[in-house]
Image (cartoon, rainbow, N blue to C red):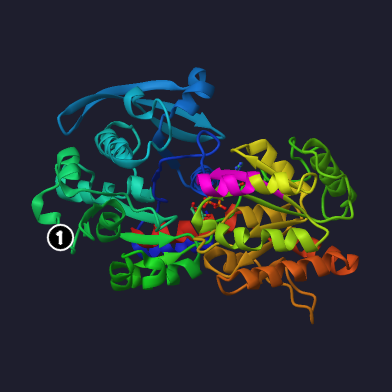
Amino acid sequence: MKKQFKSILNEKGRSELPNILLAAAECAPLSKTGGLADVVGTLPKSLKRLGFDARVITPYHRCIKDRYADKVEHMFDFYVNLGWRTQYCGIERLELDGVCIYLVDSEFYFGDKIYRGGMAEGEQYAFFTRAVLDAIPNLGFTPDIVHCNDWHTAMLPMLAKTQYNGSMQEGLRWLLTIHNIAYQGKFGFDYVQDLLGVEDKYYTPEFLELNGCADFLKAGCVFADRINTVSPTYADEIKTAYFGEGLEGILSARSNELSGIINGIDTKVFNPLTDPALPARYHKGRLGNKKLCKLALQEQFGLEQRADVPIFAMVTRMTEQKGFDLVERMLDELMQYNDMQFFMLGSGDRDYEQFMREAEQRYKGRLCAFIGYNEELSHKVYAGADFLLMPSRFEPCGLSQMIAMRYGTLPIVRETGGLKDSVKPYNRFTGEGTGFSFADFNAHEMKDAIMLALDCYRKPEVMGSLVRQAMEADFSFDRSSEEYAKLYLWML
Ligand code: ADP
Ligand code: GLC
Protein backbone atom coordinates (compact mmCIF):
# COMPACT_ATOMS: atom_id res chain seq x y z
CA MET A 1 0.00 0.00 0.00
CA LYS A 2 1.33 3.48 -0.85
CA LYS A 3 3.07 5.25 2.03
CA GLN A 4 0.86 8.32 1.85
CA PHE A 5 -2.30 6.17 2.17
CA LYS A 6 -0.83 4.39 5.18
CA SER A 7 -0.13 7.61 6.99
CA ILE A 8 -3.66 8.92 6.33
CA LEU A 9 -5.10 5.61 7.58
CA ASN A 10 -2.95 5.81 10.70
CA GLU A 11 -4.23 9.31 11.37
CA LYS A 12 -7.77 7.98 11.06
CA GLY A 13 -6.99 5.07 13.36
CA ARG A 14 -7.69 2.49 10.64
CA SER A 15 -5.56 -0.19 9.10
CA GLU A 16 -7.63 -1.22 6.09
CA LEU A 17 -8.42 0.58 2.88
CA PRO A 18 -12.14 1.32 2.56
CA ASN A 19 -14.45 -0.65 0.25
CA ILE A 20 -15.90 1.47 -2.51
CA LEU A 21 -19.16 0.98 -4.37
CA LEU A 22 -19.54 3.17 -7.47
CA ALA A 23 -23.13 3.78 -8.56
CA ALA A 24 -23.74 5.14 -12.04
CA ALA A 25 -26.13 5.05 -14.98
CA GLU A 26 -23.46 3.88 -17.45
CA CYS A 27 -20.17 2.01 -17.32
CA ALA A 28 -17.80 1.40 -20.25
CA PRO A 29 -17.35 -0.88 -22.07
CA LEU A 30 -20.77 -2.28 -21.06
CA SER A 31 -22.85 0.81 -21.71
CA LYS A 32 -21.75 4.23 -22.86
CA THR A 33 -23.13 7.48 -24.18
CA GLY A 34 -20.27 9.74 -23.06
CA GLY A 35 -17.34 10.34 -20.73
CA LEU A 36 -19.20 9.34 -17.55
CA ALA A 37 -19.08 5.73 -18.72
CA ASP A 38 -15.34 5.91 -19.38
CA VAL A 39 -14.67 7.22 -15.89
CA VAL A 40 -16.89 4.68 -14.14
CA GLY A 41 -15.31 1.87 -16.18
CA THR A 42 -11.72 2.95 -15.60
CA LEU A 43 -11.65 4.24 -12.00
CA PRO A 44 -12.29 0.88 -10.25
CA LYS A 45 -9.61 -0.90 -12.32
CA SER A 46 -7.14 1.77 -11.40
CA LEU A 47 -8.19 1.76 -7.72
CA LYS A 48 -7.69 -1.98 -7.68
CA ARG A 49 -4.06 -1.50 -8.62
CA LEU A 50 -3.76 0.71 -5.53
CA GLY A 51 -5.13 -2.08 -3.35
CA PHE A 52 -8.79 -1.01 -3.05
CA ASP A 53 -11.78 -3.29 -3.46
CA ALA A 54 -13.88 -1.03 -5.70
CA ARG A 55 -17.04 -2.38 -7.31
CA VAL A 56 -19.69 -0.93 -9.56
CA ILE A 57 -23.49 -1.04 -9.47
CA THR A 58 -25.21 -0.02 -12.71
CA PRO A 59 -28.38 -0.84 -14.64
CA TYR A 60 -28.47 -4.03 -16.71
CA HIS A 61 -29.24 -2.12 -19.89
CA ARG A 62 -30.46 -3.79 -23.07
CA CYS A 63 -27.10 -3.16 -24.77
CA ILE A 64 -25.34 -5.07 -21.96
CA LYS A 65 -27.82 -7.98 -22.07
CA ASP A 66 -27.30 -8.30 -25.80
CA ARG A 67 -23.55 -8.77 -25.45
CA TYR A 68 -22.87 -10.20 -22.00
CA ALA A 69 -25.90 -12.33 -21.06
CA ASP A 70 -23.86 -15.56 -21.08
CA LYS A 71 -21.22 -14.08 -18.74
CA VAL A 72 -23.45 -12.80 -15.96
CA GLU A 73 -24.39 -14.74 -12.89
CA HIS A 74 -27.75 -14.29 -11.18
CA MET A 75 -27.28 -13.43 -7.50
CA PHE A 76 -30.74 -12.71 -6.10
CA ASP A 77 -33.99 -10.92 -6.85
CA PHE A 78 -36.64 -8.99 -5.00
CA TYR A 79 -39.50 -6.57 -5.61
CA VAL A 80 -39.11 -2.82 -5.59
CA ASN A 81 -41.96 -0.56 -4.53
CA LEU A 82 -42.16 2.55 -6.62
CA GLY A 83 -45.30 4.62 -6.23
CA TRP A 84 -48.23 2.34 -6.95
CA ARG A 85 -46.04 -0.11 -8.89
CA THR A 86 -44.28 -3.13 -7.58
CA GLN A 87 -41.53 -4.16 -9.95
CA TYR A 88 -39.28 -7.18 -10.24
CA CYS A 89 -35.60 -6.45 -9.72
CA GLY A 90 -32.77 -8.90 -10.28
CA ILE A 91 -29.19 -8.44 -9.17
CA GLU A 92 -26.72 -10.04 -11.57
CA ARG A 93 -22.99 -10.15 -11.22
CA LEU A 94 -20.33 -9.79 -13.87
CA GLU A 95 -16.56 -9.93 -13.49
CA LEU A 96 -14.79 -7.70 -16.01
CA ASP A 97 -11.03 -7.07 -16.02
CA GLY A 98 -10.96 -8.22 -12.41
CA VAL A 99 -13.66 -5.75 -11.34
CA CYS A 100 -16.95 -6.94 -9.89
CA ILE A 101 -19.97 -5.26 -11.47
CA TYR A 102 -23.46 -5.60 -10.04
CA LEU A 103 -26.14 -5.23 -12.68
CA VAL A 104 -29.63 -4.12 -11.68
CA ASP A 105 -32.00 -6.05 -13.90
CA SER A 106 -35.43 -4.76 -14.85
CA GLU A 107 -36.72 -5.43 -18.32
CA PHE A 108 -39.41 -2.82 -17.63
CA TYR A 109 -37.00 0.05 -16.94
CA PHE A 110 -33.78 -0.96 -18.68
CA GLY A 111 -35.03 -3.05 -21.57
CA ASP A 112 -34.61 -0.25 -24.07
CA LYS A 113 -32.68 3.03 -24.01
CA ILE A 114 -30.06 3.99 -21.41
CA TYR A 115 -31.89 7.30 -21.02
CA ARG A 116 -35.59 7.37 -21.86
CA GLY A 117 -35.90 11.13 -21.65
CA GLY A 118 -38.50 13.27 -19.87
CA MET A 119 -40.56 12.01 -16.96
CA ALA A 120 -39.95 8.38 -17.90
CA GLU A 121 -36.25 8.91 -17.19
CA GLY A 122 -37.11 10.18 -13.73
CA GLU A 123 -39.02 6.98 -13.02
CA GLN A 124 -36.23 4.87 -14.55
CA TYR A 125 -33.61 6.27 -12.21
CA ALA A 126 -35.93 6.53 -9.21
CA PHE A 127 -36.29 2.78 -9.65
CA PHE A 128 -32.52 2.36 -9.88
CA THR A 129 -32.04 4.45 -6.73
CA ARG A 130 -34.51 2.39 -4.72
CA ALA A 131 -33.13 -0.86 -6.11
CA VAL A 132 -29.55 0.06 -5.14
CA LEU A 133 -30.57 0.98 -1.60
CA ASP A 134 -32.56 -2.22 -1.14
CA ALA A 135 -29.79 -4.34 -2.67
CA ILE A 136 -26.79 -2.99 -0.72
CA PRO A 137 -27.37 -5.02 2.48
CA ASN A 138 -27.57 -8.25 0.46
CA LEU A 139 -24.60 -7.89 -1.88
CA GLY A 140 -22.22 -9.81 0.33
CA PHE A 141 -19.93 -6.80 0.03
CA THR A 142 -19.91 -4.07 2.63
CA PRO A 143 -19.06 -0.69 1.16
CA ASP A 144 -17.53 1.99 3.38
CA ILE A 145 -18.18 4.64 0.76
CA VAL A 146 -20.86 4.77 -1.90
CA HIS A 147 -19.59 6.93 -4.74
CA CYS A 148 -22.55 8.42 -6.64
CA ASN A 149 -22.21 9.95 -10.09
CA ASP A 150 -24.44 12.65 -11.56
CA TRP A 151 -28.16 13.16 -10.96
CA HIS A 152 -29.21 9.59 -11.71
CA THR A 153 -27.68 8.42 -8.45
CA ALA A 154 -27.70 11.70 -6.52
CA MET A 155 -30.85 10.85 -4.50
CA LEU A 156 -29.09 7.91 -2.86
CA PRO A 157 -27.58 9.81 0.11
CA MET A 158 -30.82 11.65 0.86
CA LEU A 159 -32.97 8.53 0.85
CA ALA A 160 -30.39 6.55 2.80
CA LYS A 161 -30.20 9.25 5.45
CA THR A 162 -33.90 10.04 5.71
CA GLN A 163 -35.58 6.69 5.09
CA TYR A 164 -33.17 3.90 6.02
CA ASN A 165 -32.21 4.97 9.51
CA GLY A 166 -30.68 2.03 11.24
CA SER A 167 -30.90 -0.42 8.38
CA MET A 168 -27.84 0.91 6.53
CA GLN A 169 -24.48 0.04 7.92
CA GLU A 170 -23.14 2.47 10.48
CA GLY A 171 -20.53 4.92 9.26
CA LEU A 172 -21.41 4.47 5.60
CA ARG A 173 -20.25 7.61 3.73
CA TRP A 174 -21.58 9.14 0.52
CA LEU A 175 -19.55 10.88 -2.17
CA LEU A 176 -21.20 12.68 -5.08
CA THR A 177 -19.21 13.35 -8.25
CA ILE A 178 -20.73 15.95 -10.56
CA HIS A 179 -19.78 15.12 -14.13
CA ASN A 180 -22.12 17.68 -15.63
CA ILE A 181 -24.15 20.19 -13.65
CA ALA A 182 -26.31 21.04 -16.67
CA TYR A 183 -28.26 17.81 -16.13
CA GLN A 184 -29.96 17.84 -12.75
CA GLY A 185 -32.97 15.55 -12.94
CA LYS A 186 -35.76 18.06 -12.30
CA PHE A 187 -39.29 16.78 -11.78
CA GLY A 188 -42.51 17.85 -10.12
CA PHE A 189 -42.45 17.29 -6.39
CA ASP A 190 -45.71 15.30 -6.44
CA TYR A 191 -44.18 12.95 -8.95
CA VAL A 192 -41.02 12.41 -6.93
CA GLN A 193 -43.01 12.09 -3.74
CA ASP A 194 -45.19 9.48 -5.34
CA LEU A 195 -42.20 7.53 -6.67
CA LEU A 196 -39.87 7.74 -3.71
CA GLY A 197 -42.06 8.69 -0.76
CA VAL A 198 -40.10 11.86 0.06
CA GLU A 199 -41.65 13.71 2.99
CA ASP A 200 -43.23 17.15 2.44
CA LYS A 201 -40.76 18.82 4.79
CA TYR A 202 -37.93 18.22 2.29
CA TYR A 203 -39.60 20.16 -0.48
CA THR A 204 -37.96 23.46 0.49
CA PRO A 205 -35.05 25.45 -1.01
CA GLU A 206 -32.95 24.20 1.88
CA PHE A 207 -33.22 20.62 0.63
CA LEU A 208 -34.75 19.41 -2.62
CA GLU A 209 -36.51 22.33 -4.21
CA LEU A 210 -35.06 24.44 -7.02
CA ASN A 211 -37.09 26.76 -9.22
CA GLY A 212 -40.34 25.02 -8.36
CA CYS A 213 -39.04 21.51 -9.03
CA ALA A 214 -37.72 18.62 -7.03
CA ASP A 215 -34.08 18.47 -8.11
CA PHE A 216 -32.20 15.15 -7.78
CA LEU A 217 -28.75 16.69 -8.13
CA LYS A 218 -29.53 19.31 -5.52
CA ALA A 219 -30.54 16.57 -3.09
CA GLY A 220 -27.09 15.05 -3.67
CA CYS A 221 -25.36 18.37 -3.10
CA VAL A 222 -27.21 18.78 0.19
CA PHE A 223 -26.96 15.23 1.58
CA ALA A 224 -23.68 13.80 0.26
CA ASP A 225 -20.83 13.84 2.78
CA ARG A 226 -18.43 15.13 0.14
CA ILE A 227 -18.89 16.57 -3.32
CA ASN A 228 -16.38 16.57 -6.09
CA THR A 229 -16.27 17.30 -9.77
CA VAL A 230 -14.06 16.32 -12.64
CA SER A 231 -11.54 19.16 -12.87
CA PRO A 232 -10.24 21.86 -10.51
CA THR A 233 -11.33 24.67 -12.86
CA TYR A 234 -14.88 23.31 -13.08
CA ALA A 235 -14.97 23.04 -9.28
CA ASP A 236 -14.39 26.81 -9.19
CA GLU A 237 -16.71 27.57 -12.10
CA ILE A 238 -19.77 25.83 -10.65
CA LYS A 239 -19.67 28.12 -7.64
CA THR A 240 -20.60 30.99 -9.96
CA ALA A 241 -24.04 31.84 -11.35
CA TYR A 242 -22.83 31.52 -14.97
CA PHE A 243 -21.90 27.84 -14.62
CA GLY A 244 -23.72 26.77 -11.47
CA GLU A 245 -27.18 26.31 -13.02
CA GLY A 246 -28.86 27.35 -9.78
CA LEU A 247 -26.68 25.18 -7.54
CA GLU A 248 -23.96 27.80 -7.05
CA GLY A 249 -25.43 28.79 -3.66
CA ILE A 250 -25.28 25.36 -2.05
CA LEU A 251 -21.91 24.63 -3.68
CA SER A 252 -20.42 27.89 -2.41
CA ALA A 253 -21.83 27.21 1.03
CA ARG A 254 -20.15 23.79 0.98
CA SER A 255 -17.00 24.90 -0.79
CA ASN A 256 -14.81 23.35 1.92
CA GLU A 257 -16.30 19.99 1.04
CA LEU A 258 -16.09 20.46 -2.73
CA SER A 259 -13.03 19.50 -4.74
CA GLY A 260 -12.02 18.91 -8.35
CA ILE A 261 -10.15 15.85 -9.59
CA ILE A 262 -9.31 15.77 -13.25
CA ASN A 263 -10.19 12.56 -15.09
CA GLY A 264 -7.75 10.45 -17.01
CA ILE A 265 -8.21 7.96 -19.81
CA ASP A 266 -7.66 4.24 -20.12
CA THR A 267 -4.24 4.32 -21.73
CA LYS A 268 -4.49 0.62 -22.58
CA VAL A 269 -7.67 1.08 -24.59
CA PHE A 270 -6.44 4.32 -26.13
CA ASN A 271 -2.98 3.41 -27.31
CA PRO A 272 -1.95 4.13 -30.92
CA LEU A 273 0.77 1.50 -30.64
CA THR A 274 -1.60 -1.40 -29.97
CA ASP A 275 -5.04 -0.15 -31.04
CA PRO A 276 -6.67 -2.92 -33.11
CA ALA A 277 -9.05 -0.40 -34.73
CA LEU A 278 -6.22 1.34 -36.59
CA PRO A 279 -5.03 0.42 -40.08
CA ALA A 280 -1.44 1.19 -38.99
CA ARG A 281 0.00 1.53 -35.48
CA TYR A 282 2.42 4.19 -34.36
CA HIS A 283 4.21 5.91 -31.50
CA LYS A 284 5.84 9.27 -31.15
CA GLY A 285 9.05 8.05 -32.77
CA ARG A 286 7.27 6.52 -35.78
CA LEU A 287 4.73 9.05 -36.94
CA GLY A 288 4.83 7.94 -40.57
CA ASN A 289 2.12 5.44 -39.74
CA LYS A 290 -0.14 8.20 -38.44
CA LYS A 291 -0.15 9.49 -42.04
CA LEU A 292 -1.31 6.06 -43.18
CA CYS A 293 -4.20 6.28 -40.73
CA LYS A 294 -5.09 9.64 -42.24
CA LEU A 295 -5.00 8.37 -45.82
CA ALA A 296 -7.11 5.34 -44.86
CA LEU A 297 -9.69 7.57 -43.17
CA GLN A 298 -9.83 9.82 -46.22
CA GLU A 299 -10.23 6.85 -48.51
CA GLN A 300 -12.94 5.17 -46.42
CA PHE A 301 -15.07 8.31 -46.24
CA GLY A 302 -14.59 9.74 -49.72
CA LEU A 303 -12.35 12.63 -48.74
CA GLU A 304 -9.62 13.69 -51.17
CA GLN A 305 -6.62 11.53 -50.34
CA ARG A 306 -4.06 14.17 -49.52
CA ALA A 307 -1.53 13.86 -46.74
CA ASP A 308 -0.64 17.55 -47.03
CA VAL A 309 -4.10 18.82 -46.06
CA PRO A 310 -4.90 18.99 -42.35
CA ILE A 311 -8.00 17.23 -41.07
CA PHE A 312 -9.89 19.03 -38.33
CA ALA A 313 -12.14 16.60 -36.48
CA MET A 314 -14.84 16.60 -33.85
CA VAL A 315 -15.89 13.45 -31.93
CA THR A 316 -18.74 14.49 -29.74
CA ARG A 317 -22.30 14.61 -28.58
CA MET A 318 -23.84 17.34 -30.73
CA THR A 319 -25.26 19.62 -28.07
CA GLU A 320 -25.09 23.28 -27.21
CA GLN A 321 -22.48 22.46 -24.54
CA LYS A 322 -19.97 21.43 -27.18
CA GLY A 323 -19.89 24.83 -28.89
CA PHE A 324 -21.74 24.00 -32.09
CA ASP A 325 -23.04 27.54 -32.32
CA LEU A 326 -19.48 28.69 -32.96
CA VAL A 327 -18.90 25.95 -35.51
CA GLU A 328 -22.11 26.89 -37.36
CA ARG A 329 -21.07 30.50 -37.41
CA MET A 330 -17.55 29.87 -38.77
CA LEU A 331 -17.60 26.69 -40.82
CA ASP A 332 -18.26 28.23 -44.23
CA GLU A 333 -15.76 31.01 -43.74
CA LEU A 334 -13.11 28.47 -42.77
CA MET A 335 -13.87 25.93 -45.48
CA GLN A 336 -14.12 28.49 -48.27
CA TYR A 337 -10.82 30.23 -47.69
CA ASN A 338 -8.55 27.48 -46.40
CA ASP A 339 -7.09 24.25 -47.67
CA MET A 340 -8.46 22.01 -44.95
CA GLN A 341 -10.74 19.02 -44.41
CA PHE A 342 -13.32 18.48 -41.68
CA PHE A 343 -14.49 15.23 -40.11
CA MET A 344 -17.53 15.23 -37.88
CA LEU A 345 -18.35 12.11 -35.85
CA GLY A 346 -21.29 12.65 -33.55
CA SER A 347 -24.98 12.72 -32.95
CA GLY A 348 -27.40 14.74 -30.90
CA ASP A 349 -29.55 17.77 -31.58
CA ARG A 350 -31.42 17.49 -34.88
CA ASP A 351 -30.58 21.05 -35.99
CA TYR A 352 -26.85 20.56 -35.58
CA GLU A 353 -27.00 17.18 -37.31
CA GLN A 354 -28.88 18.75 -40.21
CA PHE A 355 -26.42 21.61 -40.44
CA MET A 356 -23.51 19.17 -40.71
CA ARG A 357 -25.31 17.00 -43.28
CA GLU A 358 -25.93 20.05 -45.45
CA ALA A 359 -22.31 21.17 -45.06
CA GLU A 360 -21.25 17.73 -46.28
CA GLN A 361 -23.19 18.37 -49.48
CA ARG A 362 -21.58 21.78 -49.94
CA TYR A 363 -18.03 20.51 -49.38
CA LYS A 364 -18.04 17.11 -51.02
CA GLY A 365 -14.66 15.42 -50.78
CA ARG A 366 -13.53 17.87 -48.08
CA LEU A 367 -16.03 17.41 -45.27
CA CYS A 368 -17.47 14.22 -43.86
CA ALA A 369 -20.37 14.21 -41.42
CA PHE A 370 -20.81 10.77 -39.89
CA ILE A 371 -23.94 11.17 -37.81
CA GLY A 372 -24.06 8.39 -35.25
CA TYR A 373 -22.21 6.82 -32.38
CA ASN A 374 -19.38 4.51 -33.38
CA GLU A 375 -16.65 3.53 -30.95
CA GLU A 376 -14.34 1.90 -33.49
CA LEU A 377 -14.60 4.79 -35.91
CA SER A 378 -13.82 7.22 -33.11
CA HIS A 379 -10.40 5.56 -32.70
CA LYS A 380 -9.77 5.89 -36.44
CA VAL A 381 -10.69 9.54 -36.34
CA TYR A 382 -8.50 10.29 -33.33
CA ALA A 383 -5.61 8.67 -35.19
CA GLY A 384 -6.30 9.97 -38.68
CA ALA A 385 -7.02 13.62 -37.86
CA ASP A 386 -4.44 16.35 -37.30
CA PHE A 387 -6.53 18.59 -35.03
CA LEU A 388 -9.48 17.99 -32.73
CA LEU A 389 -11.85 20.91 -32.31
CA MET A 390 -13.56 21.29 -28.92
CA PRO A 391 -14.88 24.84 -28.58
CA SER A 392 -17.11 23.97 -25.62
CA ARG A 393 -19.36 26.52 -23.97
CA PHE A 394 -18.53 24.67 -20.75
CA GLU A 395 -16.67 21.39 -20.23
CA PRO A 396 -16.51 19.76 -16.80
CA CYS A 397 -13.50 17.71 -17.85
CA GLY A 398 -13.58 16.40 -21.40
CA LEU A 399 -11.92 13.17 -22.43
CA SER A 400 -11.84 13.63 -26.20
CA GLN A 401 -9.04 16.19 -25.99
CA MET A 402 -6.95 13.78 -23.87
CA ILE A 403 -7.56 10.88 -26.24
CA ALA A 404 -6.66 13.15 -29.17
CA MET A 405 -3.34 14.15 -27.57
CA ARG A 406 -2.53 10.51 -26.90
CA TYR A 407 -2.98 9.90 -30.64
CA GLY A 408 -0.83 12.90 -31.57
CA THR A 409 -3.83 14.94 -32.71
CA LEU A 410 -3.65 18.49 -31.42
CA PRO A 411 -6.70 19.80 -29.60
CA ILE A 412 -8.09 23.28 -30.25
CA VAL A 413 -10.14 24.10 -27.19
CA ARG A 414 -11.92 26.84 -25.36
CA GLU A 415 -10.30 27.61 -22.00
CA THR A 416 -12.98 26.28 -19.71
CA GLY A 417 -13.23 23.48 -17.12
CA GLY A 418 -11.06 20.48 -17.79
CA LEU A 419 -10.04 21.77 -21.23
CA LYS A 420 -8.19 24.55 -19.49
CA ASP A 421 -6.65 22.11 -17.02
CA SER A 422 -5.44 19.59 -19.60
CA VAL A 423 -4.38 21.45 -22.76
CA LYS A 424 -1.26 23.56 -22.65
CA PRO A 425 -1.67 26.21 -25.35
CA TYR A 426 1.08 26.66 -27.94
CA ASN A 427 3.54 29.36 -26.98
CA ARG A 428 5.18 30.67 -30.11
CA PHE A 429 8.12 32.10 -28.19
CA THR A 430 9.13 29.01 -26.23
CA GLY A 431 7.64 26.34 -28.52
CA GLU A 432 5.88 24.80 -25.51
CA GLY A 433 2.37 23.46 -25.78
CA THR A 434 0.16 20.46 -26.48
CA GLY A 435 -2.58 22.23 -28.45
CA PHE A 436 -4.30 25.56 -29.04
CA SER A 437 -6.84 27.48 -27.02
CA PHE A 438 -8.99 30.60 -26.90
CA ALA A 439 -10.62 32.29 -23.94
CA ASP A 440 -14.02 33.73 -24.81
CA PHE A 441 -17.00 31.94 -26.27
CA ASN A 442 -16.65 33.84 -29.50
CA ALA A 443 -16.55 32.56 -33.08
CA HIS A 444 -13.76 34.88 -34.16
CA GLU A 445 -11.55 33.87 -31.26
CA MET A 446 -12.12 30.25 -32.24
CA LYS A 447 -11.24 31.11 -35.82
CA ASP A 448 -7.99 32.79 -34.70
CA ALA A 449 -7.00 29.64 -32.82
CA ILE A 450 -7.76 27.53 -35.90
CA MET A 451 -5.75 29.87 -38.11
CA LEU A 452 -2.80 29.57 -35.72
CA ALA A 453 -3.11 25.79 -35.90
CA LEU A 454 -3.15 25.97 -39.71
CA ASP A 455 -0.09 28.14 -39.63
CA CYS A 456 1.75 25.62 -37.44
CA TYR A 457 0.69 22.81 -39.75
CA ARG A 458 2.69 24.51 -42.49
CA LYS A 459 5.82 24.43 -40.29
CA PRO A 460 6.79 20.76 -39.95
CA GLU A 461 9.28 21.41 -37.19
CA VAL A 462 6.82 23.29 -35.00
CA MET A 463 4.09 20.79 -35.73
CA GLY A 464 6.39 17.84 -35.06
CA SER A 465 7.42 19.05 -31.64
CA LEU A 466 3.85 19.96 -30.65
CA VAL A 467 2.69 16.48 -31.65
CA ARG A 468 5.49 14.88 -29.63
CA GLN A 469 4.74 17.06 -26.61
CA ALA A 470 1.05 16.15 -26.82
CA MET A 471 1.88 12.44 -27.01
CA GLU A 472 4.22 12.70 -24.04
CA ALA A 473 1.60 14.29 -21.77
CA ASP A 474 0.46 11.91 -19.04
CA PHE A 475 -3.30 11.36 -18.96
CA SER A 476 -3.31 7.92 -17.41
CA PHE A 477 -6.09 7.34 -14.93
CA ASP A 478 -3.62 6.38 -12.21
CA ARG A 479 -3.00 10.03 -11.36
CA SER A 480 -6.73 10.60 -10.91
CA SER A 481 -7.29 7.44 -8.91
CA GLU A 482 -4.57 8.41 -6.43
CA GLU A 483 -6.45 11.66 -5.86
CA TYR A 484 -9.71 9.71 -5.44
CA ALA A 485 -7.95 7.35 -3.03
CA LYS A 486 -6.87 10.29 -0.86
CA LEU A 487 -10.37 11.77 -0.98
CA TYR A 488 -11.94 8.46 0.10
CA LEU A 489 -9.51 8.17 2.99
CA TRP A 490 -10.20 11.70 4.17
CA MET A 491 -13.91 10.94 4.13
CA LEU A 492 -13.67 8.12 6.66
P1 ADP B 1 -19.06 14.05 -22.73
O1 ADP B 1 -18.99 13.06 -21.65
O2 ADP B 1 -19.53 15.39 -22.32
O3 ADP B 1 -19.81 13.55 -23.91
P2 ADP B 1 -16.18 13.63 -22.95
O4 ADP B 1 -15.17 14.29 -23.81
O5 ADP B 1 -15.89 13.56 -21.51
O6 ADP B 1 -17.57 14.33 -23.25
O7 ADP B 1 -16.36 12.11 -23.39
C1 ADP B 1 -16.88 11.75 -24.62
C2 ADP B 1 -16.54 10.30 -24.84
O8 ADP B 1 -17.48 9.76 -25.77
C3 ADP B 1 -15.18 10.12 -25.48
O9 ADP B 1 -14.68 8.83 -25.12
C4 ADP B 1 -15.52 10.19 -26.97
O10 ADP B 1 -14.55 9.54 -27.77
C5 ADP B 1 -16.83 9.44 -26.99
N1 ADP B 1 -17.74 9.84 -28.09
C6 ADP B 1 -18.47 10.97 -28.18
N2 ADP B 1 -19.22 10.96 -29.30
C7 ADP B 1 -18.93 9.81 -29.94
C8 ADP B 1 -19.38 9.20 -31.15
N3 ADP B 1 -20.27 9.80 -31.93
N4 ADP B 1 -18.89 8.00 -31.48
C9 ADP B 1 -17.98 7.39 -30.68
N5 ADP B 1 -17.52 7.89 -29.55
C10 ADP B 1 -17.98 9.08 -29.16
C1 GLC C 1 -19.52 14.72 -18.55
C2 GLC C 1 -18.84 15.99 -19.04
C3 GLC C 1 -17.44 15.77 -19.56
C4 GLC C 1 -16.65 14.83 -18.66
C5 GLC C 1 -17.43 13.54 -18.44
C6 GLC C 1 -16.70 12.55 -17.54
O1 GLC C 1 -20.16 14.04 -19.55
O2 GLC C 1 -19.62 16.65 -20.02
O3 GLC C 1 -16.77 17.01 -19.66
O4 GLC C 1 -15.39 14.55 -19.22
O5 GLC C 1 -18.66 13.82 -17.85
O6 GLC C 1 -16.45 13.07 -16.27
Specify whether residue 355 is painted magenta: yes
Q: Nearer the viewer, residue 253 or 358?
A: 358
Residue 198 visible from this viewpoint:
yes
- In the rendered image, residue 202, in percent from the top left (x then y), is placed at 14, 55
Q: Quadrant of residue 422?
A: bottom right
Q: Residue furthest bottom?
A: 429
Left-right relation of 460 to 227: right
Q: At 15% from the left edge and 45% from the top edge, which residue is drawn?
A: 190
| Callout 1: CB less than 8 Å from ligand 2 | no
Disc 1 marks a residue whose amino acid type is Thr
Graded by Cα atoms within 10 Å as few (under 14), some (14 to 19) or many (20 or more), the crowding at tag 1 reads: few
- Give residue 272's position: percent from left, percent from top: 76, 46
Quadrant in the rendering for residue 285: bottom right
Q: Residue furthest left?
A: 200
As drawn, the residue found furthest toward the top would be: 70
Name the quadrant of the C terminus: bottom left
For the point 85% across and 43% down, the residue is 295
Q: Which residue lies at the image location 76% right of the left edge and 40% below the top edge?
A: 274
| In the depicted structure, whether residue 261 falls above or below residue 33 | below
Classify residue 108 by image quadrant.
Answer: top left
Q: Is residue 407 above or below residue 242?
A: above
Direction from residue 260 to residue 189 in the image, left or right: left
Nearest to the observer: residue 412 or residue 383? 412
Question: Which residue position holds label 1?
Answer: 204
Relative horizontal placement of residue 422, taking residue 226 as reference (left or right):
right
Left or right of 225: which side holds 94? right
Give yes or no for residue 120 being in the magenta stretch: no
* Magenta highlight range: 343-357
Provide residue 142's location: percent of width, then percent of height. 33, 40
